[in-house]
Image (cartoon, rainbow, N blue to C red):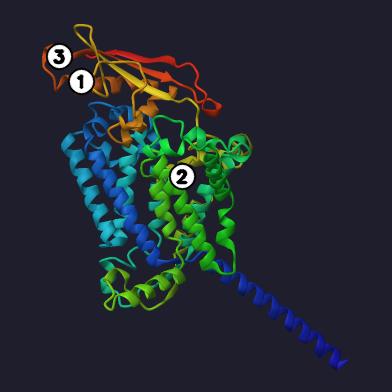
Amino acid sequence: MHWAEKNTNLKKSSMKTSTSSRMDAFLNYIQDIFSLDTRSLSVMRIGIGIVIFIDVIVRMYNLTAFHTDLWILPSEIVFSDHAAENVRSLHLISSAYAYQVALFSIHALVALLFIFGWKTRIVSVFIWVLTLSMHGHNPLVLNWGDTFTRVLLFRWMFLPRGQQRSIDNLKRKSPPLSVFSLASVGFICQLAFVYIFSAMLKDHARRTTEFTATYYALSLDGFRTTIWAWLYQFPEAMKVLTAYSWYLESFWLLLLAIPRKKALFRTICIALFISFHLWLGLTLHLYAFPWIMGLARFALVPSEVRDSLINKIKSTWKSLPWFFANTTSLHVKQQFSFLLSIFLILSLWYSYMRNLRTTDFARYDDYFPRDINRFGFMVRLDQFRNMFAPFPFTDNGWIALEWIKGDGTSVDLFHSDQVFTLEEPTNYSQHFRHERWRKYFTSMWLKKNSKYRVHGARYFCHERNSTHLSWDRVESIKRRYMLDRTLEDYEKGEVEEIKIYEAECDA
C-alpha cells in the first residue's frame, strides 16, 4: 500500500512538472513572438522621422491653401463639421500665416530631433501631439498613410525609444537589445490588425477568384505612375500580383507565428511585405502610405538577423561605424504601472473592436456602440481599412477646371497658359502639385464634401488673379469631372461629363 501511494504521488508530481514545463514553453513562445529588437526599432524611428519631416516641409509650401482661414477649409467649418478630429489641434488657435509658419517650423525641428534620437522620450510625445494637431486642422487632405502614422506614433511612445542609434544612446553603457512588454504586444497586434481586417474587407471575387483588382487599381488615371504604363500591358502579371497581395494580407500572421526557425520565417515575412509595399509605391501615387507601412516592418527584424548582419560588416571593416556598432546583448521585460497597463490594454481592445466593426456594422454595432468612438478620437486611434476595399473603385476619369476670362476665353487651371479643353490630358496623374492636392481633388469628388467646394473655387480665383494684370484676370470658374468608368478587359466606354460646380470669382 505504501509503494502504491508513493507511485501515485510520483505520477502527480510528474504531471505537475509536465504541465509547468508546457506552460513555461508556451510563455517563452509568446515572449519570443512579441519581442522586438531595439536596433530594429531605431531603424523604424529614423525612417518614420524622415517621412514626417518631408511631409511637414511639403505642407509648408501650401500653408495658405490648406492651413489658414483664407481658403480651402476655414476654421469655423473645421470646428463645426470635424469637431471629433480637431479638439486637440494647436493649429486652430490662430489662423495667422506667421503662427502657422512657426508651428510647422517647430514640427520640422521636432522631427529632426526624433530622427537623431535626442531626448527621445519627450520628443516622441511632442511629435505625436504636433502630428495629431496638423492632421486635425484639415481632414480633407488626409490619406490612409496619415491614419497609420498617427497610430504608429501612439504605439511608439510606449516602446523603448532612444535605446539604439541615437544621441541618447551615447550616454548608455549597455542598452537593451530586445524588449518584451504590453507595448511590444500592442505594436505587433496593431500591425496584424492592418492586414487581417483589410483582407476581410477585401473578400470579393475581383480579388479572390477573378484576380482583377490590380487591373482596376492601375486603371485609375489620377493615381498611376510612369511604371504603370509598362506593367499595365501584362494582364496575367497583374492577376499574379492580385493573388500575391490577397494571400499575403490574409495569411502573413502564420509566418510570424511559426515557432521553429523564427528568424528565417520572420525575415521571409518582412521581405515579402517590403516587396509588396515597394511595388505599391512604384505603381501608384499613394504618397507616404507604402513607405510608412514598409518602414513599420523593419521593427520586426529579429535579433539573430541583426547580429548576423553586424558580424558580416565587422569582417569587412576593422573599425565598425558607430551606427552599426553592437552592444552587450540584454533582454528586458518592460514594466508599466497598473493604470498605464490598463490604458494600453483598453487601447488595444479599442483598435481590435473598431476594426472588427468595420467588417460588419450591423452585426457588431451592438457590441461596440459608436459612442465609444470618443475614446479613439481622444488619442486618434480612429481607423478604417477602406483603401481600395472591397475593390478599387471604377469611377475613373479626370478633373477639368476651366477659368473663364472677361472676354469669354477660357484657360486650363492646371496649365494657365493653355487653352481649356475637355480632352483627357497626357500624364494626368502628374498634374497635381503634390499628393495633398491629389487627395484634396479626390475628396471634393465625394458628395458629402460638396459644401466645401466653394472655398476651393475662391482660392483658385485668388491665386490666378493675384498674379495677373486686371485685363488678364478671370471672372468665373467651372469644374467638371469627366467620368470614364473602368470596364473589363481594357474596354472603353463613353465619357460622361459631370458638372460639379460653377462659381463667380468675386463671390
Q: In this rendering, would 503 be left or right of 244?
A: left
Disc on the earlier residue, 3 or 1: 1
**Residue 485 to residue 15: above or below:** above
Q: In this rendering, would 115 be left or right of 465?
A: right
Label 2's element? helix
Q: Which mark is residue 375?
A: 2
Residue 98, percent from left and from top: 16, 38
Mark 3, residue position: 472
Taking the spot 34% from the left edge, 77% from the top edge, the residue there is 315
Q: Residues within 10 Å of mark 1 (few under 14, many from 20)?
A: few
Q: CA distance from mark 3 to mark 2?
A: 52 Å
Q: Amino acid at mark 3?
A: Asp
Q: Is residue 333 visible?
A: no
**Residue 159 to residue 195: above or below:** below
The quarter of the image holding the C terminus is top left
Q: Amino acid at mark 2?
A: Phe
Taking the spot 51% from the left edge, 64% from the top edge, the residue there is 34
Depth check: give the residue in front, 495 or 286.
495
Q: In this rendering, would 82 be left or right of 57?
A: right
Q: Amino acid at mark 1?
A: Asp
Q: In this rendering, would 102 be left or right of 280?
A: left
Eye-nearest disc, 3 or 2: 3
Q: Residues within 10 Å of mark 3 (few under 14, many from 20)?
A: few
Q: Residues within 10 Å of mark 2 (few under 14, many from 20)?
A: some
Disc on the earlier residue, 2 or 1: 2
Q: Which mark is residue 417?
A: 1
Label 3's element? helix
Q: CA distance from mark 2 to mark 1?
A: 50 Å
